[in-house]
Image (cartoon, rainbow, N blue to C red):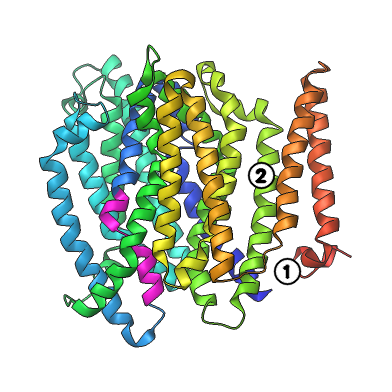
């Protein structure tokens, strides 16, 4: 249980920083959906679909490779030095190429009139890439507090600049048209200012991480680098496939939508995607804490048992989160400031389940990482990306963003199943999979029951009361089924008999 407690503690701190990091997309969503036109919000989402995709190219699996190879203490210094030198050379080269070919990249995402956005994004991606291994070093050294402080500090800079550009400057322009600040402000460039605020955030974060970043020596172990590349290159494919599945749907919606206003459709879909906030935040926080934890556990005795127990608690947590969102969706929808976005609420349950599958897949993926079979991960992700591309290509013209939601669901569901089946043959982990599948089915059925109850027409208060009853029943059910597990946990265990 101490290992579970350790992971929980790390996940809590990484969760704090991840929640702050996601503040850009989630907690600022009511403000941004109010301050921006729906089409401008869609334009912003196109840009922020490109950035994580290129982040994968710039880091090419080195973060996971670092956790894998740093476990050998005798070569720890060589690992950090070699990876950092490789990252510096590749980042400078790729940033230069991105700026030179900014016009072609802007064409790909249908933003031909704003090539300057691509230049600014190049600096964001380059700076973020350079801090990747410095952040990984903090995670490996079990320094989640500093990690969280730096993440949150960067976010505060972004928030301050966002409010300054979108609220303060327009007010100054209206009340004091001759103010000196207006020398740097151009009305109508709201999306551009959001990107510039992100540049400032990335630069600020790099400065705070300078001690960790410059801890390397300029030396390069070619033999070790080649070994790391053999491990990390398949992870590049995994990352690309993951981004195709996670963010490319907005770009594909721009390509293939037959809507009269594709940018507005992208804005509605992206806004509703944010309502999967609880699960996506938890998955992000879990992933940050779990990866170094899993690799360290792999050096101990019977790590498979720990992996199985972590999976059980993870599934229970995301099932509860699923219910909290779908049963109270009429409350959560007010997270989106304009009622225009509410037309897309039907995608939310689908996307919640999809992100649940993604989180389970992250748990399952440990088998190919600890056994150095990263090509298997690349194959699984490639299949998932193929499903995403095919479904979106065939159905976006007819069904719009609903096709994107179902493509995400089927993609992550397929990846989850493939990883489980394949992994059990190579590196068997005793997951209580029948029980976990039952938990997922139960929460979906409870959601269906809540929908049917709502059709009776007893009113909002009755619907919320019934939803609360269903949530309490599921919690009671889980506590009784998993009483033995929960009784062994710190803090809450003493309250369970």
> Between 390 and 477, which is closer to the camera in this rendering?
390
Q: Helix, strand, or loop for circle 2?
A: helix
> Is residue 492 or residue 77 the one in the foreground?
77
Left or right of 431 in this view: 241:
left
- Confirm whether the magenta stretch covers residue 237: no
Q: Position of residue 109 (x, y in %)?
A: 27, 30
Residue 369 seen in the current view = yes
Residue 176 appears left or right of 71: left
Q: Kindly report which numbered mark, 1 or 2, lies closer to the viewer in this rendering.
A: 2
Residue ID at (19%, 23%): 113
Verify CB contact (< 8 Å) between mark 1 and mark 2.
no
Q: Quadrant of residue 325?
A: top right
Which SS type dominates the magenta stretch? helix
Is residue 67 found left or right of 175 in the rendered image?
Answer: right
**Residue 201, image x, y percentages:** 31, 46
Q: Quadrant of the C terminus?
A: bottom right
Characterize the local packing of mark 1: few (<14), some (14-19) or many (20 or more) Cα atoms within 10 angstroms. Answer: few
Is 242 located above or below residue 89 in the figure? above
Say which quarter of the image contains residue 379: bottom left
Q: Give the class, few, some or many, for how many residues have Cα within 10 Å of label 2's Cα (few <14, many ≥20).
A: many
Q: Which image quadrant is residue 62 in?
A: bottom left
Judging by the rendered image, the residue that carries numbered circle 2 is 321
Q: Which segment is the magenta one?
A: 55-69
Q: Which residue is mark 1?
A: 490
Q: Is residue 81 visible?
A: no
């Amino acid at each position: 249980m101490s290992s579970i407690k350790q992971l929980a503690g790390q996940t809590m701190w990484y969760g704090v920083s991840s929640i702050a990091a996601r503040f850009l997309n989630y907690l600022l969503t009511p403000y941004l959906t109010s301050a921006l036109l729906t089409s401008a919000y869609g334009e912003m989402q196109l840009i922020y679909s490109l950035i994580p995709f290129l982040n994968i190219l710039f880091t090419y699996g080195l973060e996971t490779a670092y956790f894998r190879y740093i476990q050998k203490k005798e070569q720890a210094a060589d690992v950090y030095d070699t990876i950092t030198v490789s990252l510096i050379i590749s980042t400078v080269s790729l940033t230069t190429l991105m700026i030179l070919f900014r016009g072609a990249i802007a064409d790909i995402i249908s933003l031909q009139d704003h090539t300057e956005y691509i230049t600014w994004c190049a600096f964001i991606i380059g700076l973020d890439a350079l801090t990747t291994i410095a952040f990984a070093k903090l995670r490996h050294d079990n320094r989640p507090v500093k990690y969280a402080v730096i993440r949150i500090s960067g976010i505060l800079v972004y928030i301050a600049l966002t409010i300054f550009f979108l609220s303060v400057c327009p007010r100054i322009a209206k009340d004091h048209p001759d103010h000196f600040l207006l020398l740097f402000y151009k009305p109508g460039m709201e999306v551009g200012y959001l990107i510039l605020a992100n540049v400032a955030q990335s630069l600020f974060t790099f400065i705070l991480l300078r001690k960790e970043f410059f801890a390397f020596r300029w030396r390069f172990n070619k033999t070790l680098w080649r070994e790391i590349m053999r491990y990390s290159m398949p992870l590049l494919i995994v990352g690309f496939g993951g981004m195709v599945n996670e963010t490319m749907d907005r770009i594909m919606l721009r390509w293939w939508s037959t809507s009269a206003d594709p940018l507005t459709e992208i804005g509605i879909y992206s806004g509703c995607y944010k309502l999967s906030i609880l699960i996506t935040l938890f998955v992000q926080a879990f992933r940050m804490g779990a990866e170094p934890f899993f690799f360290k556990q792999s050096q101990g005795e019977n790590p498979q048992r720990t992996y199985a127990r972590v999976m059980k608690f993870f599934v229970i947590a995301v099932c509860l989160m699923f219910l909290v969102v779908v049963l109270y969706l009429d409350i959560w929808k007010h997270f989106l400031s304009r009622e225009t976005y509410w037309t897309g609420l039907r995608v939310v349950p689908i996307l919640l389940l999809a992100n649940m599958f993604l989180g389970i897949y992250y748990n399952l993926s440990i088998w190919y990482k600890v056994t150095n079979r990263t090509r298997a991960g690349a194959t699984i992700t490639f299949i998932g990306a193929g499903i995403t591309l095919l479904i979106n290509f065939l159905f976006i013209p007819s069904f719009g963003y609903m096709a994107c939601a179902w493509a995400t669901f089927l993609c992550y569901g397929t990846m989850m199943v493939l990883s489980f089946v394949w992994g059990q043959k190579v590196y068997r982990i005793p997951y209580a999979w029948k029980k976990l599948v039952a938990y997922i089915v139960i929460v979906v059925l409870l959601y269906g029951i809540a929908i049917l109850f709502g059709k009776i027409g007893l009113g909002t208060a009755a619907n919320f009361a019934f939803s609360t009853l269903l949530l309490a029943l599921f919690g009671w059910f889980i506590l009784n089924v998993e009483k033995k597990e929960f009784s062994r946990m710190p803090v809450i265990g003493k309250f369970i008999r």
